[in-house]
Amino acid sequence: MAVALRTAIGDARSGAIPSADVRPRAAIVAGLGRIEARRLVRHPTFWLGTAFGLTLTRGVVGAGSGSSGSTTLAWLAGGLALGMLVGTLLSANVAALRSRRDRTGELYGSLPSPPEARTLGLLTGLAVGPVTIAIVLAAVAWAVFSRTEGLAEHTDLFLAVQYPLAVFALGAIGVGVARWIPTLLGGPIIVVLHTMTPLIWLVPWILPTTSEVHATWHMIYLVAVPVTWVALALARDRRTLIRFAVAAAALALGIVAAVQQTPPGGY
Amino acid sequence: MPPGRAERLGQVRHLLWPSIRTMRWGAFLAVTSVGAAAVGSGARNDADPATIALPVATVLLGAWLCFLFEDAAATMTAASPTPLALRRAVRGAIAVAAVGAVWVGYTWLGPLDGPTGPMTWSFGAIVLVALGAAAAWTRVVGAARAALPATASLVTVVIVAPVAVSILLERRASIDPATPPVGTPGSYWATVAAVAVVILLLGHLDLARPPIVRFGRRRVFVPRRGAPAVLRSSR
């Protein structure tokens, strides 16, 4: 059986079309990014995730009787934010798995662009689509929260910047996980792992300044996570030492930042 | 002549190992581990894992079941003499046994002390909804892409719909199997399971085989007099 497997792998490798060995061109990445952005924000997973997040938050909060307007507004924004984070992760994961599920990987391999162009295109789409929506939402929430009594003291630029960064980070996790664990179950597993285990309390994504989190280390953490996963996703396309080194360095920095950002008494 | 019981048992025996071999056990291991971590940490701060963590872990197991009927070679295997229902029954029996064993293990984690009635009802309903959704979506979008909409259907039926119905009825929203949005746990989960069974059966109507129930007279092609010879000779 081992010999048969080795022969099959050898045959597949010898028959496969070698990928283009050129640098990805910016125009191609930008073009792919526009297409991927449209596909990401139109995908039912993205909107259903957001709608589900809102519904579940509404269910958790209750009818709102006895709670102030500012509390309801905070929960609404939180539900929308949480839903979009989950929707972005799942839709990015599905998008990164598209070629594998359609069995078009070898066909794409015959294109003059290298495989990295498609990964970078997807990540650009993530930045152009969900992250842009997140920036708009964060700006609106900042403007509204700043004028709302009870929320103004928790609202600042630090809080507003975290949301788009977290959306990009979770999208990058979705892409990276899809590249290395090529099953649609990867997305739901990451969501449950993140929301239903103590991981969410160890490394929270979005925190106000009043939580006494170390702001600089938290921002470093929010940058280190997507860098790790982008490097890992690109390393799957072509295994080079530099990509694994960048991923390892960003992972180490992310771990240090996760430890350093914790307030003295914990969250 | 239709195959007898011995032939069917022989087919089951032959299907057993290939079915086990082609199931996604790596994903099952990951799902099991994450579910156990979720149920284990659901007891944090004296919380009851049976109310949120266990239902979520059960839905994750159900999501794995949604992938059970994905088959890239479905159009080729549809012409096999072994009926679709038998092939899927073998696959389903193995998967449900594995999922059931893991789920019973979950019900003993942390402060939980074994499966209760509502938990068991909801587990049965979730398994049937997952299998029903997988079978139905296989018909709608094809056997290679059914898992994603099936998983979305499962999450909708088991998590989102109870919360949405509770909101509409102005009741406390919950995904706890013991507090369904309407009726008693037994009646609610039995209704969900019954609908899932109907969908599961409809999803297994085998297009490549004669129908189980035939409505109306069977139409037989009879070429008209004067038709080309090739049609007449095919009678």
Image (cartoon, coloured by chain):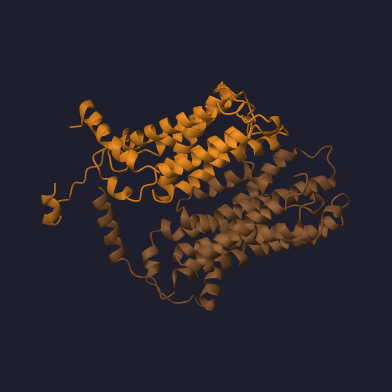
Q: Position of residue A230 (x, y in %)?
A: 55, 63
Q: Position of residue A164 (x, y in %)?
A: 68, 61
Instruction: Give above or below for A83 relative to B113.
Output: below
In the picture, measured across the screen, residue A226 lies left or right of residue B79, that is right
Instruction: Give above or below for B79 relative to B6.
Output: below
Q: Position of residue A240 (x, y in %)?
A: 46, 67
Give residue A172's quadrant in the image: bottom right
Q: Position of residue B126 (x, y in %)?
A: 51, 33
Instruction: Give above or below for A103 relative to A49.
Output: below
- Front residue (pair B134, A253): A253
Q: Colour of chain A?
A: brown
Give residue B203's quadrant in the image: top left
The reply to whether residue A2 is visible in this rendering is yes
In the picture, measured across the screen, residue B208 lies left or right of residue A49, that is left
Give residue B167's quadrant in the image: top right
- Front residue (pair B90, A245): A245
Q: Colour of chain B?
A: orange
Residue at 51% in and 61% down: A232
Instruction: Give above or below for B82 relative to A229.
Output: above
- Front residue (pair A104, B27): B27
The reply to whether residue B206 is visible in this rendering is no
